[in-house]
Each structure stands twice: as structure tokens, then as C-alpha cells.
């Protein structure tokens, strides 16, 4: 070890090397200008999470983890972003979705608002695959994908409206597809499900039997990685437990279980 370098420095060097090898490990925190209240955050404000996505699968993931989000659809035109790197594309789209929803919100004096934007793409055979254009496109994709593997990237952008900060990162999971028949492809495409999702497949729906296995977080494939969300919250000095809610019997009301800590 070099003189003057502590064990912490050596650990940081190893971490930086791993991050350079695997971009999905990285996360970034930014301070953004959102008004005069930036930086002055009460420790007792209840948290409000806004999901900038129309995806019912992402909402179900949050709900299953004890988080009840509000939903505001961003309306971002995904065709406006062009890049040859799948990680850059999904992260930029996640950022644009979060920012689009932010412009429709105002800081509330009685709560701390967070916005999470997500986007997913499949990197396969040197191409970036979002949602298929039509049934014929979905069929062609499955004819190429069957028996092979790709990497599903999901970009996450979490913004704290009150504190004026954001944290963002990409989660990546390798997906191994089953070698399915032409009849199975035709039946699956006919359901319409592949037309509504990035990569033309799901693991939490009708497409689940057509995925042999994955390497990584299944939530990433669904569209939102809960472990990554936990880490992004920590970057903003928050805990996932601060977002937990409890639904009363009958599902008639929601009571926050935790408050924001400093």
C-alpha cells in the first residue's frame, strides 16, 4: 500500500474499479434548483411518493413492499432520446419522466414529496429494444430471442422536491429465454401482453413460463428494483421504512408507519 493511503482509501479504490467495470453499480446524487425551501427539511414531515409511470407492474412492486405511491403519468415522448448505450437511454428517460412530473407539483408544507421515474430497455444482440411496434415486430423479436439471453436495464431517477436533490442509477439483470415454439410465440403475441412492455416479455405475467432463468434482481425486469430504490433513498438520507404504510381493515385508509429522519 502507498504511504499515506489508509485501508479506507484502498477499499474505495477497489469499489471504484468494480464500478467502472459494472455501470449498474453506480449511483449519482445531484442538487437541483427547485425554489427557496431547498436544504431546509423538517425531520417529522410524512413522505409522499409519486410514481411517474403508468405501469401497473411497478405500482404493484411498491405496494407489495409496503409503499403506496401516487401515480402521475409523465407523457414523455421516448423517441426523443437517441443513444447507442442502453444504460444511458433508460437512465435519461427515467430522468425525463421524473422531471416532467416535477413540473406539475408544488412543495406542500405538510409533507415531503419524492418522485420516482423509471424506464426499462432490453439490450439484445447489439440492439436496444423497447416496446415492439406491433404484433409482427413482437413475433420477429421472439423468434430471435428464444433460446438466447439479453440484459434488461432499468433506469431509476429519484427526486426529493423539498430538499432539491436527486439520486439516480441503473439496475441490470441478465435474462435467459426459453426455446419456445412458433405456436407458443403466436399464442403469446395474440394476448397483446408483449406489445405493452420493453423487450416484448414479462416475468410476472403470461410471459413468465418463457423465461428459463435470470441473473440479478427480478424487480429490475419488472421495471423497478426495490433494493436499488432503498440505496437511492439512503443517498438522500432517507430509509425505505420511512415509506412503509399500513392499510386498515377493508383497505379504507392508509396510515404512515414512519417519519422522515434527518
Image: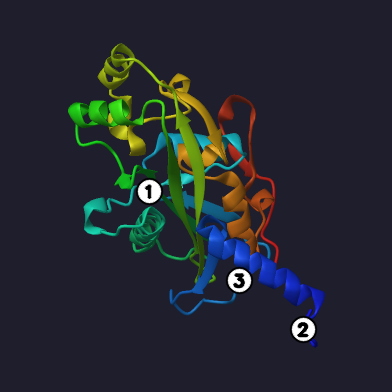
The foreground one among 3 and 103 is 3
- Quadrant of the image containing the N terminus: bottom right
Residue 195 point in image, percent of width and height: 27, 31
Give the numbered dot on residue 41.
3
Residue 141 point in image, percent of width and height: 28, 31
Assign a secondary structure to mark 2. loop
Res 147 → quadrant: top left
Res 144 → quadrant: top left
Residue 206 point in image, percent of width and height: 41, 20
Vertical order, 192 against 175 (above or below): above
Assign a secondary structure to mark 3. loop
Residue 212 point in image, percent of width and height: 50, 25
Label count reads: 3
**Residue that protrudes farthest toward the bottom in the picture:** 4
**Residue that protrudes farthest toward the top in the picture:** 183
Q: Which residue is mark 2?
A: 2
For the question of whether residue 140 can be seen, the reply is yes
Q: Residues within 10 Å of mark 3 (few under 14, many from 20)?
A: some
Q: Residue drawn 61% across and 71% down?
A: 41
Q: Which residue is mark 1?
A: 72
- For marks 1 and 3, the one nearer the N-term is 3
Mark 2–mark 3 Cα distance, whole angstroms, equals: 41 Å
Amino acid at each position: 500500500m502507498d504511504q499515506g493511503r489508509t485501508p479506507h482509501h484502498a477499499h474505495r479504490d477497489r469499489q471504484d474499479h468494480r464500478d467502472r467495470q459494472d455501470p449498474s453499480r453506480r449511483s449519482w446524487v445531484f442538487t437541483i434548483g427547485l425554489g427557496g425551501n431547498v436544504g431546509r427539511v423538517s425531520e417529522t414531515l410524512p413522505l409522499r411518493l409519486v410514481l411517474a409511470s403508468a405501469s401497473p407492474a411497478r405500482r404493484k412492486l411498491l405496494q407489495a413492499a409496503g409503499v403506496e405511491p401516487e401515480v402521475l403519468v409523465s407523457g414523455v415522448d421516448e423517441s426523443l432520446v437517441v443513444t447507442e448505450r442502453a444504460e444511458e437511454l433508460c437512465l435519461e428517460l427515467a430522468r425525463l419522466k421524473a422531471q416532467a412530473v416535477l413540473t406539475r407539483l408544488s412543495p406542500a408544507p405538510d409533507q415531503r414529496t419524492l418522485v420516482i421515474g423509471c424506464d426499462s430497455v432490453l439490450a439484445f444482440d447489439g440492439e436496444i429494444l423497447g416496446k415492439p411496434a406491433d404484433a409482427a415486430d413482437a413475433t420477429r423479436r421472439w423468434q430471435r430471442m428464444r433460446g438466447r439471453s439479453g440484459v434488461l436495464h432499468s433506469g431509476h431517477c429519484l427526486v426529493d422536491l423539498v430538499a432539491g436533490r436527486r439520486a439516480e442509477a441503473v439496475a441490470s439483470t441478465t435474462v435467459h429465454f426459453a426455446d419456445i415454439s412458433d405456436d407458443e410465440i403466436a399464442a403469446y403475441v395474440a394476448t397483446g401482453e408483449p406489445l405493452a412492455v420493453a423487450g416484448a416479455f414479462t416475468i410476472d405475467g403470461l410471459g413468465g413460463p418463457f423465461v428459463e432463468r435470470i441473473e440479478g434482481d427480478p424487480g429490475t425486469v419488472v421495471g423497478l428494483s426495490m433494493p436499488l430504490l432503498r440505496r437511492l433513498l439512503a443517498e438522500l438520507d432517507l430509509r425505505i421504512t420511512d415509506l412503509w404504510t399500513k392499510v386498515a381493515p377493508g383497505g379504507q385508509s392508509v396510515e404512515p408507519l414512519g417519519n422522515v429522519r434527518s
